[in-house]
């Protein structure tokens, strides 16, 4: 099926490549995923070749029809990929030339070096649009659980020690904030992906008079004013993979966020915490212990973040020693890229589904948050309001904590006399400080954990995510 004239070895070589060389160098087994972009890019390139007179009208028609037909065959799983033809680009070009002789003109003023850069950029643009939708899906799931658990309070932790009580929604919205920054990073890198490299040739452009801007326009490489964006240095254009590194870096950080979120859910679903329960359909069992119900989705998401971080390292390490311009090493950009995009998409989707099927166990949460010791800082604030310097107030309340410990009683069970035995400035109001509700009423500063502020942010995110789901893509 391989036609010798359509391979990169035609003319120059006296021997065919040996079998192990073909196996070692081929990339079609994974870069076939770029077929749609490759075909769309080739169509735009063919139209440009028509404008500059390389193809006549009939040849253009044949090329476009041939490419369309190949696309349909690939879609229906009827296309025969051939490893002897190395990659997606040569497979499609060879198949085209088999059915349309003018296919032999398609590679005029083009190299696989600018072609693969083009395909990758177009593929990644689509992925980012999809990913942004997935990130928002997870934001909506977090928001939903927060809205369903409006009155639920948990201990907030530092050093994994109970610190101060917070509404569960406040904790969940912290992740919504992180994910919003992840979205911003994806949108920001979209901008630099969205530059058309086609026309750069192998590395030095072409002696033929290609006009790049209309091609860029047709392929939707446009700036905010609707002007085409084409790369401005042919050597940079064929060797640049910064846009992939940026995507992998943005994803690595987003994966770290997913991993931390997963860790919280793993802890929360343990008997020790008991803050949440997830529907059976979104948990797994043990092959040995019949009583087990495990949070495997969260654990796997946490685990997969390792691969996503590794993919960033793989890409950076692959790039760092490359002389200009294209080197075959660059073919190694694809598996990390595909893996990161796939992993991010499934992790975002499964985490959202898991959270949609998770409920807070209000009683357990509120009991854990009800420990009055968590309001010790509120008692410090109370003294500060009565003119005691913070550092002194901190010491006084420390002594109150020690007293409660000595008497083996919770802090809120101390009498006013006992408080006054530590410091005379305590009055009857001090006992009211040990109210969770008061504590959450008083925390009013922007971004604080008080009821009103959390309600305000729930509304904010509700409006934003509703609107964004109507708007869609970043472009
Ligand atoms: N399959 C190659 C890649 O992904 C396409 C570019 C090959 N270019 C070359 N001059 N060998 O990098």
Image (spheres, grey):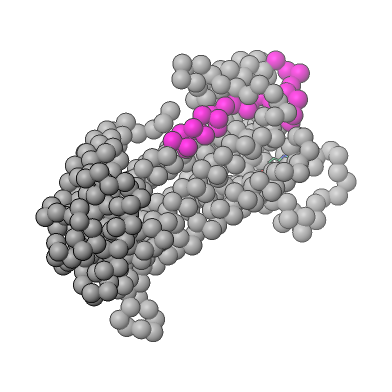
Rendered location of residue 140, percent (x, y) = 29, 46
Q: Main secondary structure of the magenta part?
A: loop
Q: Which residues are magenta?
A: 184-209
Tell me what residue is drawn at x 58 percent, y 36 percent.
243
Reply above or below: 456 against 221: below
Magenta span includes 147: no
Would residue 313 be seen by someone viewing this image from the given angle?
yes
Q: Quadrant of the C terminus?
A: top left
- Return the residue nearer the eye: 364 or 119: 364
Rendered location of residue 235, percent (x, y) = 73, 28
Tell me what residue is drawn at x 21 percent, y 69 percent.
410
Tell me what residue is drawn at x 33 percent, y 78 percent.
292
- Return the residue nearer the eye: 330 or 359: 359
Q: In which of the image's four quarters is ligand 1 placed?
A: top right
Going by the image, does 147 lie left or right of 340?
left
Magenta span includes 189: yes
Tell me what residue is drawn at x 44 percent, y 63 percent.
300
């Amino acid at each position: 099926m391989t036609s010798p004239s359509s391979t990169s070895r035609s003319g120059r070589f006296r021997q065919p490549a040996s079998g192990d060389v073909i196996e070692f160098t081929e990339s079609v087994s994974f870069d076939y995923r770029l077929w749609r972009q490759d075909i769309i890019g080739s169509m735009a390139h063919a139209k440009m070749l028509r404008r500059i007179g390389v193809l006549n009208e009939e040849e253009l028609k044949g090329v476009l029809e041939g490419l369309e037909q190949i696309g349909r065959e690939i879609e229906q799983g009827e296309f025969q990929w051939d490893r002897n033809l190395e990659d997606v680009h040569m497979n499609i070009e060879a198949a085209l030339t088999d059915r349309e002789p003018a296919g032999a003109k398609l590679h005029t003023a083009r190299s696989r070096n600018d072609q693969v850069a083009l395909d990758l950029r177009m593929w990644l643009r689509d992925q980012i649009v999809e990913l942004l939708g997935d990130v928002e899906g997870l934001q909506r799931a977090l928001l939903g659980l927060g809205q369903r658990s409006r009155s639920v309070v948990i201990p907030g932790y530092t050093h994994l020690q109970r610190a101060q009580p917070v509404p569960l929604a406040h904790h969940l919205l912290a992740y919504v904030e992180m994910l919003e920054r992840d979205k911003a990073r994806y949108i920001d890198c979209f901008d630099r992906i969205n530059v058309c490299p086609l026309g750069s040739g192998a590395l030095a452009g072409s002696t033929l008079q290609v006009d790049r801007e209309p091609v860029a326009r047709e392929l939707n490489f446009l700036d905010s004013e609707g002007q085409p964006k084409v790369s401005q240095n042919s050597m940079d254009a064929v060797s640049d993979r910064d846009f992939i590194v940026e995507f992998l870096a943005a994803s690595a950080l987003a994966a770290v966020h997913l991993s931390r979120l997963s860790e919280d859910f793993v802890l929360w679903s343990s008997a020790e915490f008991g803050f949440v329960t997830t529907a059976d359909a979104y948990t797994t069992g043990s092959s040995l212990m019949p009583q087990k119900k495990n949070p495997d989705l969260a654990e796997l998401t946490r685990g997969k973040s390792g691969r996503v971080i590794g993919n960033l390292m793989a890409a950076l390490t692959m790039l760092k020693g490359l002389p200009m311009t294209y080197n075959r090493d660059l073919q190694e950009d694809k598996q990390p890229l595909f893996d990161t995009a796939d992993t991010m998409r499934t992790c975002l989707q499964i985490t959202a589904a898991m959270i949609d099927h998770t409920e807070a166990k209000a009683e357990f949460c509120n009991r854990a948050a009800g420990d009055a010791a968590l309001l010790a800082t509120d008692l410090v604030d109370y003294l500060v309001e009565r003119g005691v310097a913070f550092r002194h107030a901190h010491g006084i309340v420390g002594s109150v904590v020690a007293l409660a410990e000595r008497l083996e009683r919770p802090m809120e069970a101390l009498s006013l006399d006992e408080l006054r035995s530590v410091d005379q400035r305590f009055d009857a109001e001090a006992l009211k400080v040990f109210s969770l509700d008061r504590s959450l009423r008083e925390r009013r500063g922007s971004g604080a954990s008080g009821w009103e502020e959390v309600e305000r942010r729930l509304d904010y995110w509700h409006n934003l995510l509703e609107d964004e789901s109507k708007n869609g893509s970043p472009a």
